[in-house]
Amino acid sequence: IMSVAPETTTTTTTKDNGPQPSSRGRQIPIVCPGHTRPLAELSFCTVEETKAEERTFLVSACHDKMPMLRDAKTGDWIGTFAGHKGAVWSCRLDPLGLLAGTASGDFSVKIWDAITGSSLFTYPHKHIVKTLDFSPDSKYIATGGHEGLLRVFDLRKEKEETPILTIKQNGEKTVTITKCNWLNATTVLAAGSDGSINYWNVDPKHEGEEQHRLMGTLKVDAEVRDMELSKDFKTLTVAAGTKVYFFDVENKSLLCSHQMPIHFRDEGGASLHPDGKKFVAGGSDLWVRVFDYETGTELECHKGHHGPVRCVRYDPDGKTYATGSEDGTIRLWKTDP
């Protein structure tokens, strides 16, 4: 499924007059229809098909209960993972591109064969599941959601519905886990509705009380709406409130933050270009904006969606980026039109 959108305007914004035409001219994004409700998450995965050839896929989570797999370069539809009974909030491929994982409002996480699209097994939860991520070695999956519990499941134990590890996100109060990312073989970052981003030691061999698993915390001023690890795992991009934050992952320190002309209270996200020099953000309005990493200066502003932007991601090669909207479409944009 693929179509080309009408020519869309690239603009820059001034405080006095709103969006203004940009000197970068016009860009025609590839429009990927197929979804019927607002998008929730986009994720790229590049896999080696042969020693000399790579292929990149794009997976999309959507409130229509039907996560989809596409060719990331053309936007062509490849398949749909059909089986959830509630909105799908998160969809990821494992690093090898062989498995897909989906987190849903039907209180479950499903693992799929990414080649055939068949459902392999289901992990039941007790509330809405908002996020999941595969470990770097594809052996484990971490999940989180409205229960405020970070769970880790062993994918090698297909029939075992009980997690090998369950960690409460924050003390007595239930804090929704909005995003989680596997940092390395034994560490998961879990972002919460209270603006905290916790580093958890999830090594099954680790002994000691739950609080001893907490290795550090980052803090932002509002509920974390989006969180992305850079390709080299050194920089963490966070969209929360009205700002985009960039953290040094190893030193657990803030590198910089930039005030946005939009907010991320209800939807939206941000993604850092692989070269680290610019980032794309979208949220409470219809515009997709590109900013300078160092200064926060707006470089580009594209209008093409007919609803607020709910998710954005750069392709790992940096040549394109994808945006998903409340209008039910995904758009693929060129980084340098």
Image (tube, rainbow, N blue to C red):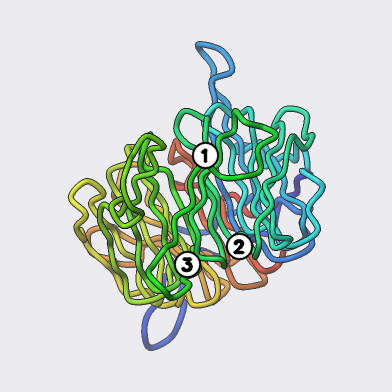
Q: Give percent across and percent down for residue 305.
A: 64, 66
Residue 35 vs 182, above or below: the answer is: below
- Report if the CB atoms under discs 3 and 1 are less than 8 Å apart: no
> Image quadrant of residue 96?
top right
SS at mark 2? Answer: strand
Q: Amino acid at mark 2?
A: Thr
> Image quadrant of residue 216?
bottom left
Kindly give the residue lying farthest to the top in the view shown.
51
Residue ID for mark 2: 8
Q: CA distance from mark 3 to mark 1?
A: 20 Å
Using the rendered image of the protein, determine whether residue 329 is visible from the camera's viewpoint: no
Label 3 CA crowd tier, 10 Å (few <14, some 14–19, many 20+): many
Q: Give percent across and percent down for residue 238.
A: 37, 61
SS at mark 3? Answer: strand
Q: Residue at x 62, y 48 (%)?
A: 91
Task: Give the camera-side residue of 134 and 29.
Answer: 134
Residue 258 vs 56, above or below: the answer is: below
Q: Nearer the viewer, mark 3 or mark 1?
A: 1
Q: Residue at x 75, y 49 (%)?
A: 3
- Report if the CB atoms under discs 2 and 3 are less than 8 Å apart: no
Q: Residue at x 54, y 76 (%)?
A: 266
Residue ID for mark 3: 225
Horizontal placement of 152 versus 252: left or right?
A: right
Quarter of the picture containing the N terminus is top right
Q: Residue at x 70, y 34 (%)?
A: 159
Q: Nearer the viewer, mark 2 or mark 3?
A: 3
Task: Give the camera-side residue of 179 and 52.
Answer: 179
Q: Amino acid at mark 1?
A: Phe
Q: CA distance from mark 2 to mark 3?
A: 27 Å
Residue ID for mark 1: 134
Circle number at residue 125: none
